[in-house]
Image: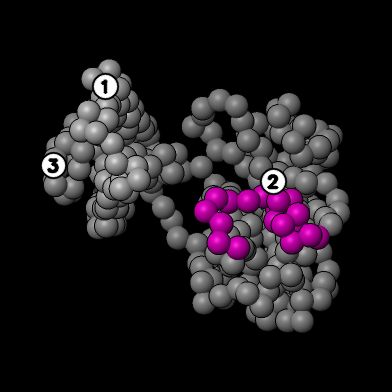
């Protein structure tokens, strides 16, 4: 098996739009089973929409506008990439997160090309593998991972081929610690991260209001007005995510602080918390609950963004 370390860049934007963001650069490194680099692939892509790169993307990636202007469209680059990939009898993509495969699938569909290859070829999310290995609770960038491993990266960050080469360095360094049973295949999702976070907050709110976190209570409280108009597959995914959140054990409150004999104080000292302090704490709790409610109600109203 060959490992294809893949990275893409896409033309992000600073404003909301129904028009899709598109891949503007693909970079890939082919490693054999011994993790030796065999060859590389790189190509710019001229997008259909937002053909002029905004200042943020230009500054972040350093991609020259004239390179994009001269580049081929996605169908031609995708064909070349598939031809390059065909040199390997069996491949597994190695990505830093799940966005790279997703973006290629979305662009493939936008151009009405077959997505079968991308849906049936496995990929391994090295970012998740790395965070599990290091016991991290937050994601880390490729540059951050290199630093943690005391490896020196080369090239320019946020350029597809350079990022793929640096990701390959990480892959070699942690290969023996990875559980490749966790490889994945791309699966369509119908909710976005904000909606899933809103569902999580909704479970907290139901419990705070002494309501059982059931799907019926969630629908009645948060999505009753639009339940009939939601796409069925999205509703099914929302329900599954809600049930997973509701099934998670509630964290037990820590036991009350117990004073030692040396720390024993008079009855008046033990109840020294003033009414003002209690009032302040209650106000803070109410404010947190209000913020959770506001976030849940606002986010759950936002339309799904399939980009």
Q: Is residue 150 magenta?
A: yes
Q: Which residue is mark 3?
A: 211
Which labelled disc corresponds to residue 163?
none
In the rendered structure, the answer to whether residue 221 lies left or right of residue 185 reads: left
Quadrant of the rendering where the N terminus is positioned? bottom right
Which scheme is used to colour this image of the protein?
Answer: one colour
For the record, the magenta segment spans 134-151
Q: Position of residue 82 (x, y in %)?
A: 69, 65
Q: Position of residue 96 (x, y in %)?
A: 63, 57
Q: Which residue is mark 2?
A: 9
Q: Residue at x 80, y 38 (%)?
A: 63
Within the image, what quadrant is residue 29 found in? bottom right
Q: Work out whether residue 301 can be spotted.
A: no
User: Is 213 drawn above or below residue 165 in the view shown?
Assistant: above
Kind of element beneath mark 3? loop
Q: Residue at x 64, y 67 (%)?
A: 93
Q: Is residue 285 magenta?
A: no
Is 251 in front, or is 189?
251
Within the image, what quadrant is residue 20 found in? top right
Count the numbered circles shown: 3
Kind of element beneath mark 2? strand
- Pointer 2 local density, CA inside 10 Å: few below 14, some 14–19, many at least 20: many
Q: Mark 2 and mark 1: span between their CA atoms?
A: 56 Å
In the rendered structure, the answer to whether residue 74 lies left or right of residue 207 reads: right
């Amino acid at each position: 098996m060959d490992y294809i370390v893949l990275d893409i860049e896409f033309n992000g934007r600073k404003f909301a739009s129904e028009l899709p963001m598109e891949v503007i650069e693909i970079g890939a490194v082919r490693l054999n089973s011994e993790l030796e680099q065999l060859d590389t692939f790189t190509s710019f892509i001229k997008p259909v929409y937002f053909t002029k790169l905004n200042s943020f993307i230009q500054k972040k990636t350093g991609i020259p506008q004239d390179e994009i202007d001269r580049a081929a469209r996605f169908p031609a680059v995708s064909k070349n990439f598939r031809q390059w990939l065909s040199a390997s009898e069996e491949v597994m993509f190695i990505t830093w997160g799940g966005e790279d495969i997703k973006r290629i699938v979305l662009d493939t569909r936008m151009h009405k090309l077959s997505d079968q290859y991308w849906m049936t070829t496995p990929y391994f999310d090295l970012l998740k593998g790395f965070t599990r290995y290091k016991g991290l609770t937050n994601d880390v960038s490729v540059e951050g991972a290199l630093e943690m491993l005391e490896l020196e990266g080369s090239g320019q960050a946020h350029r597809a081929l350079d990022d793929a080469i640096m990701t390959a360095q990480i892959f070699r360094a942690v290969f023996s610690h990875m559980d490749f049973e966790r490889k994945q295949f791309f699966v369509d999702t119908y909710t976005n991260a904000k909606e899933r976070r809103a569902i999580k907050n909704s479970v907290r709110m139901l419990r705070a209001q002494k309501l059982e976190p059931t799907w019926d209570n969630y629908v009645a409280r948060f999505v009753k007005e639009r339940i009939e108009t939601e796409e069925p597959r999205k509703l099914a995914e929302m329900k599954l995510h809600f049930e997973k959140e509701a099934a998670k054990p509630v964290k037990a409150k820590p036991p009350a602080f117990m004073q030692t004999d040396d720390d024993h104080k008079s009855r008046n000292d033990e109840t020294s918390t003033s009414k003002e302090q209690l009032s302040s704490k209650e106000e803070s709790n109410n404010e947190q609950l209000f913020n959770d409610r506001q976030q849940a109600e606002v986010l759950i109203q936002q339309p799904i963004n399939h980009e």
